[in-house]
Amino acid sequence: MRPMPVDPTNQRAAIGSRLRAARRSQQLTIDQLATVTDLTKGFISRIERDMTSPSVSTLVALCEVLHVDIGDLFASSDVELVTAAGAPRINLGGEGANERLLTPRRESRLQVVRSTVSPGGSGGGKLYTINSPVDVVHVLAGSITVQFSDRTLTLAAGDSLTFDGREPHNWQADLEVETELLWILAPAAWEGTV
């Protein structure tokens, strides 16, 4: 059996939301954009809602005013799923922690790690640093104590702490119950295989 040919008319690109986002990022109203492009507000609104397709010349005019490359309107979104079962195990050096990388290995903008920590688990025996200027820990369950050279903070379930990962620190999980943590590092502390 031969596959059915794809009908290109059924594969319309939804560019309206990208045009709307570009307009809003420049803090332009539809009225202002209509004035500059000599289009009606209603027509621009229909384009932004993907209810009509603009001509090539209209699209060029909109893109010039909004400082958008036409090709960017048609680029596919960069989306990568990491499933709970497929999240790779990693080792950040902690004791008693089962750690899973929730962002793609090649993602350099940030990393999200979920740690399931046994009672009393910790970041190790001494203060350490990580090569990320933004380090966020969010406690999903249990609690942790985070130690810096000049202070100690205790976080309960639902609490978050943001700090510079290059600042010497360490952490200790609840001594009685399993602790669940999310670590967010921006930019990623490493990239590639872990």
Image: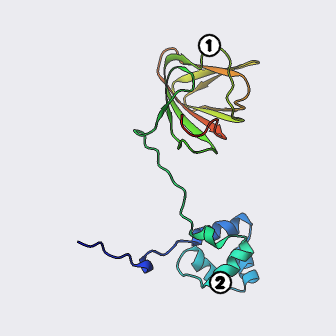
Classify the position of the C terminus by image quarter.
Answer: top right
- Residues under labels 2 and 1: Cα distance? 64 Å
Question: Measuring 63% from the left and 71% from the top, which residue is drawn there?
Answer: 19
Instruction: Tell me, for residue 58, which label it has, or none.
Output: 2
Q: Earlier in the sequence, mark 2 or mark 1?
A: 2
Q: Nearer the viewer, residue 142 or 86?
A: 86
**Image quadrant in which you'd find residue 5:** bottom left
At label 2, which amino acid type do we have?
Thr
Q: Which residue is mark 1?
A: 125
Question: Measuring 43% from the left and 43% from the top, which residue is drawn there?
Answer: 83
Query: Does residue 42 appear in the picture of this structure?
Result: no
Question: Measuring 46% from the left and 44% from the top, which residue is drawn there?
Answer: 82
Mark 1 burial class by Cα count in 10 Å: few <14, some 14-19, many 20+ = few
Q: Position of residue 186 (x, y in %)?
A: 66, 40
Provide the secondary structure element on which disc 1 rests. Answer: loop
Picture layout, residue 188 above or below residue 17: above
At label 1, which amino acid type do we have?
Gly
Picture layout, residue 25 above or below residue 60: above
Classify the position of the N terminus by image quarter.
Answer: bottom left
Q: Residue furthest left?
A: 1
Q: Nearer the viewer, residue 61 or 37?
A: 61
Q: Nearer the viewer, residue 193 or 90?
A: 193
**Image quadrant in which you'd find residue 21:** bottom right
- Describe residue 30's horizontal placement relative to residue 159 as left or right: right
**Image quadrant in which you'd find residue 93:** top right
Q: Position of residue 113 (x, y in %)?
A: 54, 35
Mark 2 burial class by Cα count in 10 Å: few <14, some 14-19, many 20+ = some
Q: Position of residue 36 (x, y in %)?
A: 76, 81
Q: Which color scheme does this rendered protein use? A: rainbow
Instruction: Tell me, for residue 61, which label it has, or none.
Output: none
